[in-house]
Image (cartoon, rainbow, N blue to C red):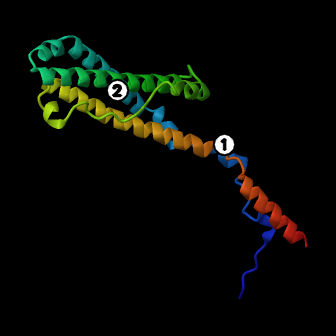
């Protein structure tokens, strides 16, 4: 026996009706919830502690260790320490922006407009692997730790961007509107 189909539930475009506003307002974003959670607070503390630890090392013991390196390794040390500092500044800026949103100090729109100043880009070590191995162990450890933190933050940032893009209403495609007009015109005849 054939099942009858009631097309009254279809909208003018021939699709199922849009979800009621009730569902849109109660949908909880997992990514945004994560970004405002205790996990984020832990990530924030970890990031800021790494900034402090790196600054302390580079301003203290790192300077003394750099003086003891041969010329090529000393140049690699300078390049790697600059790369480490840049990477950590980017991560700290992102963490501070996200915390400001979480604490209501900035709106999401304000943070988004400020975010263009923060360049979250993967940065590998600044020198070839054999030269990297000649660098002081502590600098290598800080660099590797910062790259792992960078990967986590980039992943979270990309997830937030994708999540926010899904929430934004999409503009109707000009082609889709033309196809719809054709469909309506042919259906009328």
Quadrant in the rendering for residue 168: top right
Q: Nearer the viewer, residue 77 or 14?
A: 77
**Depicted 186 relative to depicted 4: above or below:** above
Q: Left of 149 or right of it: where is 3?
A: right
How dense is the environment of label 1, judged by Cα within 10 Å: few (below 14), some, or many (20 and up)? few
Q: Is residue 12 visible?
A: no
| Place of residue 145 in the rendered image (x, y in percent of width and height, measured from the top left) | 26, 31
Q: Answer yes or no: do the residues labelled 1 and 2 have beta carbons within 8 Å?
A: no
First of labels 1, 2 by sequence position: 1
Badge number at residue 123: none
Which residue is nearer to you in this view: 158 or 27?
Answer: 158
Residue ID at (90%, 69%):
188
Q: Which residue is mark 2?
A: 87
> Residue, x 66% and y 46% (percent of image)?
24
**Could you say where residue 25 lies in the image, as x and y percent from the top left?**
66, 42
Q: Quadrant of the C terminus?
A: bottom right
Q: Which mark is residue 25?
A: 1
Q: In the rendered image, which quarter is residue 16 located in? A: bottom right
Q: Which residue occupies the extreme right position in the image?
A: 189
Element at badge 2?
Answer: helix
Side of 64 where 123 appears, left or right: right
For mark 1, give the secondary structure. helix
């Amino acid at each position: 026996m054939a099942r009858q189909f009631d097309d009254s539930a279809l909208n003018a475009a021939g699709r199922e009706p849009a979800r009621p506003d009730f569902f849109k307002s109660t949908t909880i974003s997992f990514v945004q919830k994560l970004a405002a959670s205790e996990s984020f607070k832990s990530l924030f503390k970890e990031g800021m502690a790494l900034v402090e630890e790196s600054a302390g090392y580079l301003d203290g013991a790192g300077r003394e260790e750099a003086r003891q390196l041969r010329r090529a390794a000393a140049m690699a040390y300078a390049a790697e320490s600059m790369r480490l500092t840049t990477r950590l500044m980017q991560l700290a800026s992102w963490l501070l922006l996200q915390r400001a949103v979480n604490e209501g100090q900035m709106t999401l729109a304000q943070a988004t407009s400020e975010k263009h100043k923060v360049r979250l880009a993967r940065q590998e070590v600044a020198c070839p692997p054999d030269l990297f191995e000649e660098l002081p162990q502590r600098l290598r450890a800080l660099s590797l730790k910062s790259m792992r933190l960078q990967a986590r933050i980039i992943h979270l940032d990309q997830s937030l961007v994708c999540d926010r893009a899904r929430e934004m209403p999409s503009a109707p495609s000009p082609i889709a509107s033309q196809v719809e007009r054709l469909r309506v015109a042919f259906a009328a005849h």
